Image: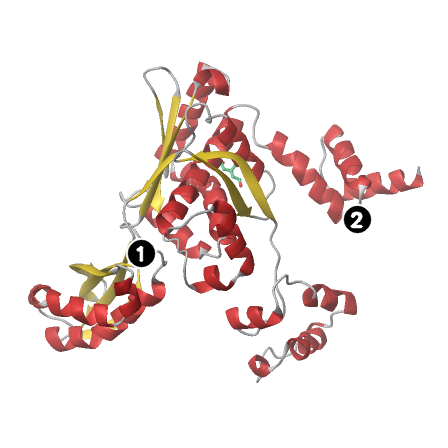
């Protein structure tokens, strides 16, 4: 019988009571409930404050990428990811550019954009002019929303008013450009947009509608670059191979999506490890990749006059060091300590460098032996575990599957049976 998902009052219950309800609703056994109950490394109180209707936690592996030199500093990089090969690829790639100084980074600024949409206007150009006339007043209204931000040197910086054509007719879109310093800034700019919006309706005669930040944080663009010497990475042929791979991504959106996904394997893992919003970073990255009207690669590769490979990357990086989960999640705090960063700018440069490292690693593998060789060795271990292998059995089952060039759970299960019989 299908049960109703209408669990009235669920939000008011404690962990045990919520789990009891889920258990009976989904007919779960005790072992499953135990897996859910013991799932969190965080105290339930904290989990319950971070999200609604919490029943536990979900642990993602956290590892350290080694060998990274960023802006002259040796830095250990905490990365939270469930995907095998990702952390190893960053370390391998970083090792291959240590002799050229590693990665060099910069950030364009720490400004976020909040958008206010104004509709029902027959005279959008006049409305635009009226809003622009009030820049000083708008700055005052915005800055009054967040005295702490002002004290930290942030606050309103600029105003843009755009007119866009839509199926519902022309709309005026006001952009509040706000320096949010070391915060990602969503709360600060959303409050400003919501506070200002009624005034915008009053001044223009239109109707304010949506008031929310833009994740296309193109005033907060992180950049990273590195050079890999041809002889270190295997010669001119490999340089050419990586160039052809990069040019493919830049020319073809089907490839660019995968190429950029590889970049985000690195960026999102640092984002998650530091308690930042992975979806915000991903949305910003992909929108930025499409800013020319065609979805393209986020990274660029060139051959230097000496025949070496120069890689660079540029993408929006709205990462914060204060506020949200960053501040309250003890693991995120620990990861920030490992990184040793003191500003969002530094953190953003690191994430961009890790994205570039990840991308170089993937392109090099794809342009040479292919991705499966390294990937499959680790994947095989996961399949072995899923088949029930424990302890020493894991490596043995994985090895036998690799030897047989067949990595499947049914194969792992039969290897396991024969291992145990022997
Ligand atoms: C897999 O997670 C990422 C890659 O597909 C990236 C790429 O193809 O460039 C290997």
Residue 92: image location, x then y, percent = 54, 30
Residue 391: image location, x then y, percent = 80, 44
| Residue corresponding to mark 2 | 388
Residue at 51 percent of width and 28 percent of height? 95
SS class of the residue under badge 2?
Answer: loop
Residue at 57 percent of width and 84 percent of height? 9
Q: Which of the two residues, 16 or 402, is positioned nearer the viewer here? A: 16
Q: Earlier in the sequence, mark 2 or mark 1?
A: 1
Position of 235 compared to 286: left or right?
right
Residue at 46 percent of width and 26 percent of height? 97
SS class of the residue under badge 1?
Answer: loop
Q: Is there any visible trace of residue 210 in the rendered image?
A: no
What residue occupies the far right of the structure in this picture?
A: 422
Q: How many marks?
A: 2
- For label 2, the crowd category at 10 Å Cα-Cα, with few meaning under 14, some 14 to 19 and many 20 or more, is some
Residue 59: image location, x then y, percent = 62, 57
């Amino acid at each position: 019988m299908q049960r109703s998902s209408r669990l009235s009052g669920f939000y008011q219950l404690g962990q045990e009571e919520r789990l009891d309800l889920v258990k009976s609703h989904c007919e779960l056994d005790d072992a499953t409930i135990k897996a859910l109950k013991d799932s969190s490394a965080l105290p339930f109180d904290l989990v319950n404050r971070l999200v609604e209707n919490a029943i536990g936690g979900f642990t993602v592996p956290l590892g350290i990428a080694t060998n990274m030199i960023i802006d002259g500093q040796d830095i250990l990089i905490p990365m939270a990811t469930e995907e095998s090969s990702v952390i190893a690829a960053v370390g391998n790639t970083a090792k291959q550019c240590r002799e050229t100084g590693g990665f060099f980074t910069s950030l364009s600024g720490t400004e976020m954009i909040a958008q206010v949409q104004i509709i029902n206007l027959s005279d959008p150009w006049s409305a635009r002019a009226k809003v622009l006339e009030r820049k000083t007043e708008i700055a005052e209204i915005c800055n009054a929303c967040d005295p702490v931000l002002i004290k930290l040197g942030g606050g309103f910086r600029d105003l843009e008013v755009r007119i866009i054509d839509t199926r519902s007719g022309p709309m005026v879109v006001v952009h509040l450009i706000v320096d949010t310093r070391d915060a990602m800034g969503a709360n600060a700019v959303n409050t400003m947009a919501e506070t200002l919006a009624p005034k915008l309706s009053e001044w223009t005669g239109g109707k304010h509608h949506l008031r929310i930040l833009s994740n296309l944080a193109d005033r907060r663009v992180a950049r990273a670059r590195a050079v890999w010497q041809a002889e270190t990475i295997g010669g001119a042929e490999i340089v050419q191979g990586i160039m052809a791979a990069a040019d493919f991504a830049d020319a073809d959106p089907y490839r660019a999506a995968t190429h950029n996904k590889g970049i985000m394997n690195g960026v999102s893992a640092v984002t998650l490890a530091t308690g930042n919003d992975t979806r915000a970073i991903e949305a910003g990255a992909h929108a930025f990749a499409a800013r020319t009207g065609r979805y393209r690669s986020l990274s660029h590769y060139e051959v230097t006059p000496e025949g070496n490979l120069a890689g660079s990357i540029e993408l929006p990086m709205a990462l914060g060091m204060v506020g949200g989960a960053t501040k309250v999640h003890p693991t995120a705090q620990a990861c920030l300590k490992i990184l040793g960063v003191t500003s969002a700018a530094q953190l953003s440069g690191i994430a961009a460098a890790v994205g570039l490292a990840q991308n170089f690693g993937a392109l090099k593998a794809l342009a040479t032996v292919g991705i499966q060789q390294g990937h499959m060795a680790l994947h095989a271990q996961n399949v072995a575990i899923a088949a029930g292998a424990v302890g020493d059995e894991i490596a043995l089952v994985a090895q036998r599957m690799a030897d047989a060039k067949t990595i499947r759970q049914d194969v792992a299960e039969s290897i396991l049976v024969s291992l145990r019989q022997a």
